Amino acid sequence: MASEQDLRTDSFPAGIAGAGLGSVTRQIAADEPPPLPPNSELAAIGKSFPRPNGRAKVTGAARFTVDIALPGMLHARVLRSPLPHAAVRAVDFTAAARHPGVRAVLPIATPDDRANATLRYVGAPVAAVAAVSLAAARQAAQLIRVEYQKLPFVVEMNKARAADAPVVHDETTAPPGHPSGFPAAAGLPLDGNVRGPAIVKRGDVAEAFAASDLVVEDEFSTQVQTHCCMEPHAIVADWREDGLTVYMSTQFTVGVRHELADMFGLPLNRVRVVVDAMGGGFGSKSSLGNYGRFAVELSRRAKAPVKLFLDREEEQMDAGNRPATWQRLRIGAKHDGELTAISLVSYGTAGVAVGAGVGNIAESMYACPNFTGAQHDVFINAGPGCAMRAPGNAPGAFGLEQTIDILAEELDIDPLALRDRIDPSPVRREERRIGAELIGWHRRHKPGADAGPIKRGIGVAQSLWGANVQINASCEVRVLRDGSVEVLSSVQDIGTGIATVLAQTVAEVLGLRPQDITVRIGDTDFPPGPPSYGSRTTASITPPARTAAWRVLQQLFRDAALNLNAGIDQLVARDGKIAVRDDVNRGMSFKQAAALLRTDRISAVASRSDDYAGFRRRMGDAALAQQDLGGVQFAEVAVDTETGIVRVERIVAVQDCGRPMNPRQIESQVQGGVLMGLSYALYEDRILDPETGRMVNPNLEQYRLAGPRETPQIDVVVLENYQGQSATDAYGIAEPANIATAPAVANAVYNAIDVRIRSLPMTPAAILAALGKVPARS
Amino acid sequence: MLNPTAALLAASGPDNTGLPSVGPDAIAMTLQINGVTRTVHGEPRMTLAEALRGPLGLTGTKIACNRGACSACTVWLDGMPVCSCMILAIDGGDRRVTTIEGLAQGDMLHPVQQAFIDHDALQCGFCTPGMVMSCAALLEHNAAPNADDVRTAISGHICRCGTYPHIVTATLEAAKQRKA
């Protein structure tokens, strides 16, 4: 801990720009960089600079993992279970091993090892082969003879909850849960296929419901959504005597390195993980994955590099998914809208995995003294779910935000006015005000008021997400004697644009242009960077980048100060020059200053400091900032009551992420979050055949995604919300932008047709059934 | 030596098409790629996308669904955008194949490429080469497209990052730049 002498007091911008920007005083470590002024006073940060890797991406030069070819590289293929539940009785590799070009085989499901002998979903890996070509590997995999013993299975959550349902896991095979689950804490009881509940309680719900003026209660369900990364999950593993190098399409180079070191008994300094261009993850590329392990094992056995990537069918079956959920919400209130109690019960299924809750949004978004939540995981014989863009809170908001609208209608209060009353966040209050004006909330009519067959409606919903920070995040900034600059970290750019933001951050400090900074990232040979999940990348890596740049600049100033006959603290770096603050004529170019260096290169490494006002809590390498992230989204829809087709005509998304670093990239992120939410609301659905357990739409055409034709006008507004919390005061945006869209669309659909849709996706069949025009499908 | 059945097939061609019967072993195929005549060795079942990414080393063309559902693999065949995963390399023949690597004139980017950078019409970048090829093809055939024309041009493409709005903006801007 810093002693008193190591601290200093400084004043930081605080509040929302344009709506009462003030300042806050913080006591911070003396070696933190000076406070960063608001964006309006900056040259590089807060401006929409283009991506440094843009040219490579539009010319085809960008190198993705699937593009890598190493000398002598083999190709691997995984044989997968055709059955949803089976015990492997025998595996015969004879014919496969003899197939021309095969260099290694890998048993995965092994009959003699009970823990490994059971396959629990269609697509579960059985064995793998590596061969000189992908065609040879495919053919060889088909030659592996497997004897399966069929076991009873269940792929529907409701049936899996029954006492006599086939059992997917026992205590020894059930996944242990993880502390950061959604929620899936370790140590919860298992009863049949039901694990949990995970319980959260505050106050006395029973008493509060009894004392409420009004109680509303409703049930909601959401489907399984798959990630559909355009670049498949891919790895090239290169096992050598002197160490393991892995090229992987990953959201977390450092995490994969740790997994590999643990799994293969290697010291960290013998494991290197590299990712250059990365074709999307959305949560599904957060860890090594089973395929990653297979590729490394095969490389070790074959003594050659091995490339393994999933095809689209494998992607849909065994690369993770957003779990299906069911929730029942009860909300009690006073006549004036004040909330008295909320109770939540949920059941969700992540297939054979855990983590199918509906998040903390019902617990945390609104002021309510009494709350109980009981969330359950249900195991079914389906591929494992995993984190997907705002896990938990995306399905959670679909229930909560509709129930709040139901309550508003019962109380005869406008949905925005009710939220103004019960939402303690001043940030979301401002977001509601801005969004309401943009969408034209005053035009919103009574539900179902349009006369013709096409009925329009407007709806609103809010989002809540934790402001996550990775403490284990470092960055190096180097200045070379020719005046060139490098920024290095193992952090990976998965498409969010962190490379651009790093260049801007360092350029701002050094008084250079972002294009003058070379960004070298995505390699564990560089200082360890944060993961690109949990919307934490910008929050975690930009403060150490600015700090490292500031410290290296002080080194540069030392030689320049002597030369300029000035004190170090009189110097400023601006417009490509090092100059004396109050005497613009006394200065030199950045290049000239660099030429004065005694050595070819100077460098500074900085790590993520704690937030200036401290964290709400710490969990290992991660921490949760004091403030939340969020946003408010408005949807305008047109529902054709004859065909059941819902058309989203416009979305207004008003979001906050602390200090916005690059407005255009943030706009891209928000548009992406909105489209993924819209697609979730209306189209996407993993459909399993209850007779065979197989996914019937394991592709990109019958698994329907919103495309350009379904893309509405999307108006993005991002607040500049300063809090004086770090060297950059910047936080994340990707997940909060994804949470409110589906409930906003659902609330708009209700406003259009006067019928509430409680289940996703809102397909034409579902709309017609809700309107009573066709029978409901189970 | 051909067996009698194979000989008969070879004479009349598969399904009496009169075309020569080839395969399953690798054969030599000559293709016109980005203005250069290239010969590749591969099995006749090899798709154009596989030939580009494999023996030709042109990995800018991406495969994401491998069945014509996402258009990530879009290249031009005689100037028209096609899914290269749905075409056999052997059917390329004398037709001019243009890939993402062949779109720029030296260091001078195609206006669509530049506009994609300027308007942040890409995120992860995996669908980008295909998107660029379709939007550039649109401008080759329609100098003054409107937003709906752009949406039609990319309506078979999938972008999971959700770049469609910026792609429309970028392509319209590229058309404007080109006229000016």
Image (cartoon, rainbow, N blue to C red):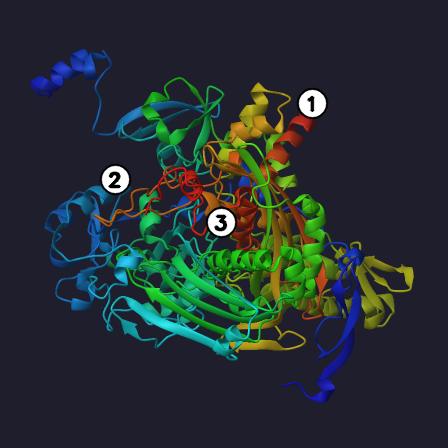
Mark 1 vs mark 3: in front: 3
Front residue of A144 and A212: A212
- The amino acid marked with disc number 2 is Ala
Which subunit holds the residue at mark 1?
B
Residue picked out by circle 3: A756
Farthest residue to the left: give it: B4
Task: Measure the C-alpha gap from mark 1 to mark 3.
Answer: 50 Å
Q: Which labelled disc corresponds to residue B179?
A: 1
Residue picked out by circle 2: A135
Task: Measure the C-alpha gap from mark 2 to mark 1.
Answer: 47 Å
Q: Residues within 10 Å of mark 1 (few under 14, many from 20)?
A: few
Against A57, residue A196 (above or below) is below
Q: Residue at x 35, y 41 (%)?
A: A775
- The amino acid marked with disc number 1 is Lys
Residue A475 sits in quarter: bottom right
Image label count: 3
Q: Mark 2 falls on what kind of element?
A: helix
